[in-house]
Amino acid sequence: GLGMNSNEANECDLDVLSIRPWTMSSLVAQSYVNKSNNMVLVGDAAHAFPPAGGFGMNTGLQDSHNLAWRLALLLRSSNHHMASSVLTKYESDRKPIATQNAALSVRNYNRTLRIAKACYLDAQHPELLTTVLGSLSLLPLETRQGMFRRLVHVAMMPLASLTSLNSSLHANHIERNVQSILESGGSLPLVFPKYEIGFSYEHGAQSKKEDASNDTKGYYPRMRVGYRLPHIILEVWNSSISHARDGWSVLETTSHEAEDPSDSLFITLTDISSQLRKVLSYDTPVFTLLVLGALTASSLTSIRQAIDKVSNKMNTPLIMANILPEAPSDEDNVSENIITLIDSQRVIWKLMSEESSDTADNPCNAMVIVRPDGHISSVEF
């Protein structure tokens, strides 16, 4: 643990109160934020998983992705009362995901034991070896090292036949066991799209018990609260802002000339809040309001209400982007000051219709508020 003392210069000194060696475990902290809201746990400080699948690193990166914009928002805000709600939401977002990933990592670790058992190796042997050597701590180091080598040799004897030049019934039996596991898909999976990019911060989304058979299920994009914005290719229609190439995450252009002023830009929707912040030169995290379909008098009223709500609650800008299924004509009289993006394949409407039938025939009545980290904050039809 760490203790903190403040000296006269108001600089923090860290005192090491305790240390312990790493041991394999599956742990999630009870709380991610202290009562004073001046200490936040992230990564390995918040959770520890068995090393089977890289979940510790991936979960830690997800923590940082969720926390970074919150810290940036708080550091730039004079509203000190906002810290509690902003950081509490970080914990309510991330703790269920860590708990879910902890269970997944244990299941994945147990999958690795199937191979070990097929080779007649006992997963309890290392723990037993550590216990035995610990009880002999009074013996000389050289003696303990010799015992360690002999015990490891005994534990690994089931594999000795595999290294022999002469084939044996025992070796053939082990090979058949392992081959059977591999052919049945029982090997250690390394890709988990559902957990890596398909996770959701929707309240209660992780409450149901996970089915181990679905661990390697693919990623399916959703336009739903809590989910990450899917990758949808959009064309930047506004000529006035499409030239701000340093801000856009450009996927492709309509010409081969790098700086052609008439060139159209195609971007991804996934990190739209981050792109707009750079394009419009904001020095603070921003939320994005995606308005689907042509703007109407009623939608403008809802837009103003949404902007006021986010500005008052989060003390940060809400940037509006209008998404249309086709480029507006001259008769449409669309202002260049409104950020307009074209989804000519109507992908976003297809995804929205899967969440609500209301958008299937009337795509003009949908608004989506997106957080700075690209996760959907709210959806209104």
Image: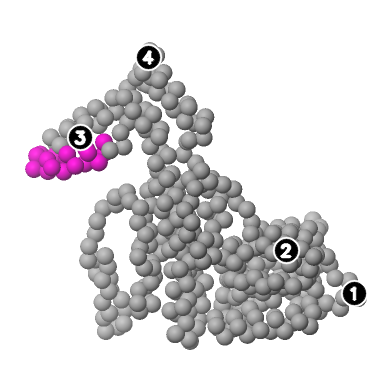
Image point 44% across, 79% down: which residue? 83
Mark 3 residue crowding within 10 angstroms, few (<14) / some (14–19) / many (20+):
some
Pointer 3 with pointer 1, Cβ within 8 A: no
Read off the residue under disc 4.
168
Number of residues whose C-alpha sits closer than 10 Å to that of mark 2, classed few (under 14), some (14–19) or many (20 or more): few
Q: What residue type is disc 4 on? A: Ser
Q: Nearer the viewer, mark 3 or mark 2?
A: 2
Q: Vertically, is 232 above or below 315?
A: above
For marks 1 and 4, give the one nearer the viewer.
4
Q: Which mark is residue 330?
A: 1
Q: Earlier in the sequence, mark 2 or mark 4?
A: 4
Residue type, mark 1 in image: Asp
Cα–Cα span, label 3 and label 2: 66 Å
**Crowd class of label 1 (few under 14; some 14 to 19; many from 20; radius 10 Å):** few
Residue 3 in picture, x, y percent from top left: 26, 71
Please give the range of residues in magenta: 125-141
Q: Is residue 373 left or right of residue 256?
A: left
